[in-house]
Image: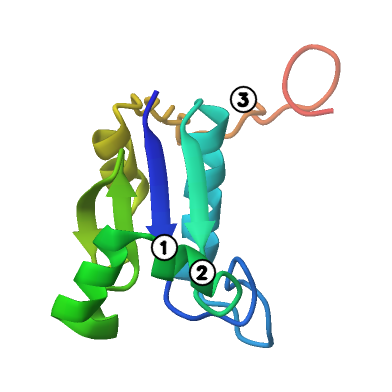
Amino acid sequence: MASLQLFDRPLCCSTGICGPEVDPALVALAANLAWLTRKGVAVERINPAQQPLAFAANPIVREELHTHGNDCLPLVLVDGVVVSRGQLPGRVQLAAWTGVPLEATIALPVMTESCCGGGESGPSGGCC
């Protein structure tokens, strides 16, 4: 199975979903990374504010930062190869990069009529 590393922008906490105003894109990213983990992908999310040595120790990340500056963050590597820079990826992208199949979503039927049938109540059909 693939391994994915996400080198984040500096965030106040490891997920970036703390504080008084939570960014919904970061919440979605956290959920999508958890989904990848459940599918067997080795996921590592690295925050420069909390793990600066991980940034410094990775030659690919150092080169990206040298070439593009902080604009390359978030930087996504799959199996050591840059697949995305400067944007938060969605589930479709993450699935494609890691080879994880997307599940089909189930469309629920839309009620166009009352569930009570003919409008009569009681044990002979209709609402109770």
Q: Residue visible at 50% across and 62% down? A: 46
Label 3's element? loop
The quarter of the displayed image where residue 11 is located: bottom right
Label placed on residue 16: none
First along the sequence among labels 2 and 3 = 2
Q: Nearer the viewer, residue 22 or 1?
A: 1
Label 1's element? helix
Question: Could you tell me which quadrant the C terminus lies in?
Answer: top right
Q: In the figure, 116 relative to 6: above or below?
A: above
Residue 84 is situated, as x and y percent measured from the top left of the image, at 22, 58
Pointers 2 and 1 in contact (CB under 8 A)? yes
Q: Residue visible at 41% across and 63% down? A: 57
Q: Which residue is mark 2?
A: 53
**Badge nearest the viewer, 2 or 3:** 2
* Colouring mode (rainbow / by chain / secondary structure / one colour): rainbow
Label 2's element? helix
Residue 66 is situated, as x and y percent measured from the top left of the image, at 20, 79
Q: Please name the amino acid that badge 3 sits on.
A: Gly
C-alpha span from label 1 to label 3: 71 Å
C-alpha span from label 2 to label 1: 6 Å
Most distant residue in the top direction:
124
Image side of residue 67 versus residue 24, left or right: left
Q: Which residue is mark 3?
A: 118
Q: Which residue is mark 1?
A: 57
Q: Please name the amino acid that badge 2 sits on.
A: Leu
Q: Nearer the viewer, residue 123 or 85?
A: 85
Q: Please name the amino acid that badge 1 sits on.
A: Ala
First along the sequence among labels 1 and 3 = 1
